[in-house]
Image: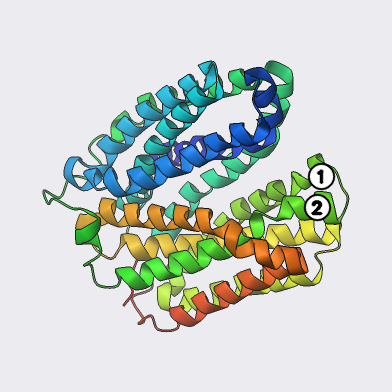
């Protein structure tokens, strides 16, 4: 089972690296393409729209052709989009290429989460899913740190080309997963998924968690560079520390299997809330903020694990459509977070953003109190 887990984790790593890559290399890209930084960042918006569209329209295909087959097709599409990004002659072609990457990611991510639950032995769902989610740690390191260093060394086009090559290698390595997540034989769609019992509460928990995270995360860099007067390089260390915590949380994932959703979710979301409150109190200390970012990563990993396991188990025959809704809600939160956090940041700085996030996370803990106890497995379907 190690090879499939490594493939799925690496696929998340490549997808996440692409989604995080543009921000640290935007200056280099804008100079090469003779465009303003704001114009270049529109490619990130095109990527987000592509993810949201594919999550609704393409993800349900996993229920018809199988999650493994959809993932392999998405990896080829991702490789094409990344190669086109590397070769983009102007900002418009970069936007188009990133929209293609978004379509690929929107189809791939639901398939990856579905396959993680399919290959996991009974009672070890949270542990396997945790290993796969560690791919986001890989993307944090590649997207924030290594990509910036590689851009200085070889240029941003080489970075995109390298990611395209990795996507092709993953496509080849994923051949054994071709038949995994067998098709259910049922035609599914976002509308059929919305009729699944428990889906609205699962998506509510998703929205509270994701909106809470991005409402603060998007403003950490501005806080460190503007309020604390530190360099962009030092601002980039916070996502790195967060990613380290996110990866370390793999060691705690077996506890989720033993406790089950109903017992694990409320205290995990309370721990997320506590991490926001602690960062709110020490937002003016860079050193403490970095240390608390590790705690933030640990608690956020556990919360994400629980939410993904919760929604994927609602109806195994509609996992593709359900995870499409999950990705759509996630990227709607990415879109809404700057608006939710902007007013708080303008009035109270990062502490205000953290207060908003703490309120949202506490609301998620309250929602989780209504889950009915299940057998000791985080994969158990909640009420």
What is the number of the mark on residue 95?
none
Can residue 1 be seen? no
Q: What crowding class fits label 2: few (fewer than 14 Cα within 10 Å), some (14-19), or many (20 or more)?
A: many
- Residue 167 position, x and y percent, is 44, 27
Farthest right residue in view: 229
Q: What crowding class fits label 1: few (fewer than 14 Cα within 10 Å), some (14-19), or many (20 or more)?
A: few
Whether 94 is drawn above or below 220: the answer is: above
Farthest left residue in view: 185
Check the picture and name the quadrant holding the C terminus: bottom left
In contact (CB < 8 Å): disc 1 and disc 2: yes
Res 246 → quadrant: bottom right
- Residue 347 position, x and y percent, is 75, 68
First of labels 1, 2 by sequence position: 2
Name the residue: 72% across, 63% down.
345
The answer to whether 249 appears left or right of 319 in the picture is right
- Residue that badge 2 annotates: 224
Name the residue: 13% across, 50% down.
187
- Residue 94 position, x and y percent, is 51, 26
- Residue 242 position, x and y percent, is 67, 53
- Residue that badge 1 annotates: 234
The answer to whether 73 appears left or right of 151 in the picture is left
Secondary structure state at the residue bearing disc 1: helix
Res 4 → quadrant: top left
Name the residue: 34% across, 77% down.
374
1 vs 2, front mark? 2
Q: Could you tell me how far apart the alpha carbons at marks 1 and 2 are, in whole angstroms?
A: 8 Å
The answer to whether 240 appears left or right of 134 in the picture is right
């Amino acid at each position: 089972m190690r090879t499939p887990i490594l493939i799925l984790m690496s696929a998340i790593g490549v997808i996440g690296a692409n989604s995080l890559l543009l921000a640290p290399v935007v200056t280099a890209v804008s100079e090469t393409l003779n465009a303003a930084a704001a114009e270049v960042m529109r490619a990130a918006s095109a990527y987000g729209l592509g993810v949201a569209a594919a999550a609704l329209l393409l993800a349900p295909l996993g229920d018809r052709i199988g999650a493994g087959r959809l993932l392999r097709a998405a990896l080829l599409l991702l490789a094409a989009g990344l190669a086109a990004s590397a070769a983009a002659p102007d900002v418009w072609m970069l936007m188009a290429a990133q929209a293609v990457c978004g379509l690929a990611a929107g189809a791939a991510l639901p398939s990856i989460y579905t396959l993680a639950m399919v290959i996991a032995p009974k009672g070890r769902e949270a542990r396997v899913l945790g290993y796969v989610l560690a791919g986001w740690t890989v993307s944090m390191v590649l997207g924030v740190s290594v990509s910036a260093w590689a851009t200085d060394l070889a240029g941003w086009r080489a970075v995109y080309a390298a990611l395209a090559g990795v996507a092709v290698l993953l496509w080849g390595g994923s051949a054994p997963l071709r038949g995994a997540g067998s098709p259910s034989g049922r035609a599914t769609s976002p509308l059929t998924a919305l009729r699944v019992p428990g889906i609205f509460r699962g998506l509510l928990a998703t929205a509270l968690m994701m909106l809470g995270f991005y409402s603060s995360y998007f403003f950490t860099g501005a806080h460190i560079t503007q309020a604390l007067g530190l360099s962009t390089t030092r601002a980039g260390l916070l996502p790195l520390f967060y990613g380290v915590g996110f990866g370390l949380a793999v060691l705690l994932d077996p506890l989720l299997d033993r406790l089950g959703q109903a017992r694990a979710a409320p205290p995990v979301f309370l721990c997320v809330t506590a991490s926001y409150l602690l960062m709110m109190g020490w937002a003016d200390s860079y050193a403490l903020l970095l240390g608390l970012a590790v705690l933030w990563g640990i608690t956020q990993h556990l919360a994400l694990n629980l939410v993904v396991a919760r929604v994927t188990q609602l109806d195994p025959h509609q996992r593709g459509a359900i995870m499409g809704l999950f990705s759509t809600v996630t990227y709607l939160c990415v879109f809404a977070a700057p608006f939710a956090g902007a007013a708080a940041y303008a009035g109270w700085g990062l502490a205000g953003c953290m207060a908003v996030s703490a309120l949202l996370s506490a609301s998620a803990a309250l929602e989780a109190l209504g889950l009915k106890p299940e057998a000791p497995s985080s994969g158990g379907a909640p009420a």
